[in-house]
Image: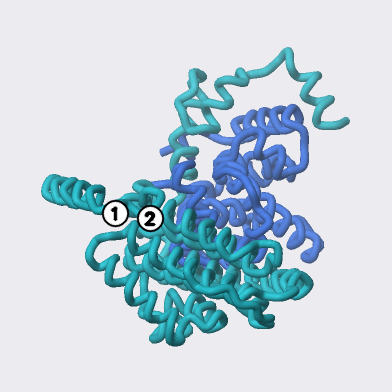
Chain colours: A blue, B cyan
Amino acid sequence: MSLSEESFESVLEAAKAGAEWAWASIYRELAGPVTGYLASRGAAEPEDVTSEIFLKVARSIHTFEGDKRSFRSWVFVIAHRRLIDERRSVGRQPDFTEFSPDSPGGNVESEAVDLLITDELRQAFEELTDNQRDVLALRMIAGLTLADTAQVLGKKVGAVKALQRRALEALLEKIDLENVTH
Amino acid sequence: MSDSDVYEGEMTKNRFSDQDMERFFSGETPEDEVLAKLTPLVRRLRAHDTHRLSEERVTEFAAEAGKLATTIRLNEAGPAAHQGTVSRIRRFNLTLKRKLAAGLASVLLLAGMTGIAVAANDAAPDDTLYGLDKALEAVGVLDGGAAERIEEAQSLFDDGLVAEAISHAAEAVAQTEDAESFSPESAKAAEALEGAALSVLANGDAESLEVREAVAEMLSQMADWITDPELDGRTLGESVSDLAKGIAGAPDGLPDAADNAAEEAEAAEENAEDAGPPEGVPAGPPADVPAGP
């Protein structure tokens, strides 16, 4: 069950004051999608990075004002920037194939990402451009709206529309639908 | 070629409509057959197994984040409040001090109504009202005369005379004779009040949040008032009383005996019909805030 707009306001104020129950609500609501997004974008340790991101949210929450939707968008901006930082420090594009759902680090939070990681779909996803993968991950896994995705990526809405269209079409050209939707 | 150039060039050969794409990404079933086949995948991805987050992990994170948020908030409020307070202190009227004590007594009563009260003198650092305890000490509430007044107000409250209890706590010191004294403790008291506001807000369950928010706001307001040299004692007492009554849902002013009787009769009737929570206190946690997995 997700937080409603009405209860979000109370949760936000309580979280700013340090209430543990409020932070538990926020974590249950968003940690899963954030971990899935990071894993789908090749983050080395998605769970650890998720923890870092939410601690950053805790440090900065006193600066945030807005509704539930803009809070979700704000969290993913932080997540996306963290991802970019990791890419820069690693000095290469993340190798999506290195993430193994069966490894000790692969765990229950990544199960939804496992759904994406069939060999065929994973390969097709990897052949997309970086921007296309970002857009699909934010829309399909993180569940952000078109406008919020544009905000996270720092792009115009029209550009994101084009990216998601091309990404989806490219993905569909590369895969056999029957194999990935069984 | 920029992304927007690509968009313009491809408008005439779009395989999927904008509306269908939005249906797809939002998890609804699109009209296009191919997108419709992919939709279950999106739904599975979106439903992202949050119920599988281990409660141990959630609890561990919540504790860490809660402490972090509180620390940062207190660090920001403390130095700024202290600086502002020190710069505004001139001479502090003893009556003002006592009215503040009465206001804090009101807060204790309100806390008692919400079930989050701890006996002020017994509050320990981890207790909900530890901040209030320190605030009371800073203004000398826990000494003779003021403590007696708290007991009287508590007695009224125990008898169910909430409006009278609050009014007594906030108004009784109006009869105190004016005296003037400089109190360097007002800065400490203001800091303690701000700390108490944060403590009240941070400690407690979702059920009492609404009242705790109102109490915290009142404490913050009092922290501002306590260091305002232009504010006279009577105005402070009335202002605190108004805030306290607003939180408790009590009517303005001291009701007379006839009103008391009528109110008691009404209350008895209501209690018989529906034993609900006091006015202003939520019946339970926000209905759609998950309490757990």
Rendered residue at 59%/51% (across/down): A37
Q: Residues within 10 Å of mark 2 (few under 14, many from 20)?
A: many
Given the image, what chain letter belongs to the residue carrying mark 2? Answer: B
Tell which of A36 and A175 is nearer to you. Answer: A36
- Residue topped by disc 2: B248
Q: Secondary structure at mark 2?
A: helix
- Is residue A102 at all visible to an observer of this figure? no
Which of the image's four quarters has the N terminus of chain B?
Answer: top right
Give the total of numbered labels: 2
At a point 57% along the width and 43% down the height, the residue shown is: A67
Secondary structure of the residue carrying tag 1 is: loop
- Marks 2/1 in contact by CB < 8 Å: the verdict is yes
In the rendered image, residue A64, in percent from the top left (x then y), is placed at 65, 53
Q: Judge by depth and name the residue closer to the eye, B57 or B193.
A: B193
Rendering coords of residue A165 (x, y %): 66, 28
Going by the numbered disc 2, the residue's amino acid type is Ala
- At 50% from the left and 56% from the top, the residue drawn is A26
Judged left or right of residue B2, residue B170 is left
